[in-house]
Amino acid sequence: MERTEQITARALSLVGQDRYKLVMLVSKRADQLSNGAEPLIKADKNKQKFTDIALLEIAEGKVKLESITDL
C-alpha cells in the first residue's frame, strides 16, 4: 500500500507543487463527499476519511482544480 507521503507528492505534482491549492482542493472535495458525492475511486466512505479519499482521487487525476467550481 502506498504511503500518505507518496500520495501527497503525486497530488502536489498535479497542482503545480502549490500546497495551498492542494489543501483547498482536498477540502472542497472532502466536503462534497461528506454531502453525499460518490467517490471516484474504489473507496469505502464508512472506513476511510473523506480527506484521505479526496487526496487519493486528486493523486490519481480523478479530481482537478477545474472540476471544483466554487474555489
Image (cartoon, helix red, strand yellow):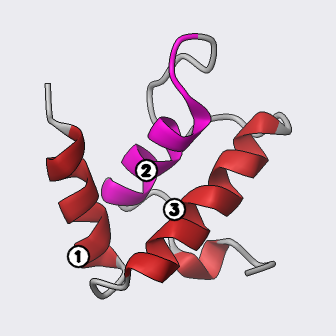
Q: Residue at x 63, y 12 (%)?
A: 46
Q: Residue furthest right?
A: 35
Label placed on residue 55: 2
Q: Quadrant of the C terminus?
A: bottom right
Measuring from the top left, give residue 44's x and y in whole percent: 54, 16
The residue range painted magenta reads: 47-59
Magenta stretch: helix, strand or loop mostly: helix
State which tag comes first along the sequence, 1 or 2: 1
Instruction: Give the residue at mark 1.
Output: 13
Which secondary structure, mark 1? helix
Q: Residue furthest top?
A: 47
Label 1: how many Cα within 10 Å (few below 14, some 14–19, many 20+): few
Distance between the alpha carbons at the discs numbered 1 and 2? 12 Å
Q: Residue at x 43, y 50 (%)?
A: 55
Measuring from the top left, give residue 60's x and y in whole percent: 32, 53
Measuring from the top left, give residue 40's x and y in whole percent: 54, 41
Label placed on residue 33: none
Label 3: how many Cα within 10 Å (few below 14, some 14–19, many 20+): many
8 displayed left or right of 1: right
Q: Quadrant of residue 50?
A: top right
Instruction: Give the residue at mark 3.
Output: 63
Residue type at tag 2: Leu
Q: Residue at x 31, y 76 (%)?
A: 14
**Cβ–Cβ under 8 Å for marks 3 and 2:** no
